[in-house]
């Protein structure tokens, strides 16, 4: 579900599933929580492989942001058009910083 690697103080977390929906959200929450509890406080969530997100998936991403609180950053990268549109419709594009590529996001946080 999540592949992660450290890049100069930034954790790059790549979602490997095509869908972040009600079935995948619990596993995502467990994986991202483990990263945060393990000390990751600057996280790039690479959604390049994800073509569909539902409300459960959005809730899981927001939950990760809340878990980080003010002690860190969570940014999104590689949004496919349907995912970007969903963020705009829900106005979460105003909450999350987004980047075209994971490399751009890592550079911005690094």
Image (cartoon, rainbow, N blue to C red):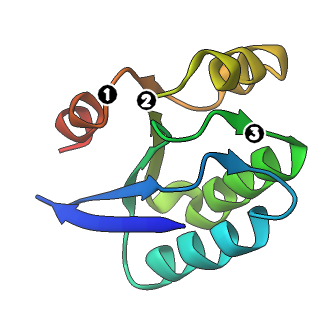
Which residue ends up furthest to the front in the rendered image? 18
- Label 1 close to label 3 by CB (< 8 Å): no
Q: Which residue is mark 3?
A: 53
Q: Which residue is mark 1?
A: 101
Q: Is residue 75 left or right of residue 7?
A: right
- Of callouts 1 and 3, the N-terminal one: 3
Q: Is residue 5 left or right of residue 68?
A: left
Q: Which residue is mark 2?
A: 78
Taking the spot 40% from the left edge, 85% from the top edge, the residue there is 38
Label 3's element? strand
Badge 1, how many Cα within 10 Å: few under 14, some, many 20+?
Answer: some
For this rendering, which residue is in front, 74 or 18?
A: 18
Taking the spot 63% from the left edge, 19% from the top edge, the residue there is 84
Q: CA distance from mark 2 to mark 3?
A: 13 Å
- Of callouts 2 and 3, the N-terminal one: 3
Q: CA distance from mark 1 to mark 3?
A: 18 Å
Quadrant in the rendering for residue 7: bottom left
Label 2's element? loop
- Label 1 close to label 2 by CB (< 8 Å): yes
Q: Is residue 45 positioned above or below 87 on the image?
A: below
For this rendering, which residue is in front, 93 or 26?
A: 26
Where residue 15 appears, x then y in whole percent? Answer: 50, 54
Where residue 52 appears, x then y in whole percent? Answer: 72, 36
Q: CA distance from mark 1 to mark 2?
A: 5 Å
- Label 2 close to label 3 by CB (< 8 Å): no
Taking the spot 54% from the left edge, 67% from the top edge, the residue there is 1
Badge 3, how many Cα within 10 Å: few under 14, some, many 20+?
Answer: many
Q: Is residue 38 positioned above or below 15 on the image?
A: below
For this rendering, which residue is in front, 67 or 100?
A: 100
Q: Quadrant of the C terminus?
A: top left
Label 1's element? loop
């Amino acid at each position: 579900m999540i592949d992660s690697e450290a890049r100069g103080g930034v954790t790059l977390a790549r979602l490997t599933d095509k869908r972040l929906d009600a079935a995948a959200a619990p596993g995502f929450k467990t994986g991202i929580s483990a990263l945060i509890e393990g000390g990751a406080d600057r996280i790039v969530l690479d959604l390049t492989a994800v073509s569909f997100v539902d409300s459960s998936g959005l809730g899981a991403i927001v939950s990760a942001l809340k878990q980080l609180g003010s002690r860190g950053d969570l940014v999104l990268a590689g949004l496919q058009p349907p995912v970007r549109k969903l963020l705009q419709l829900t106005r979460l594009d105003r909450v999350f910083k987004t980047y075209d590529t994971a490399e751009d996001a890592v550079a911005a946080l690094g």
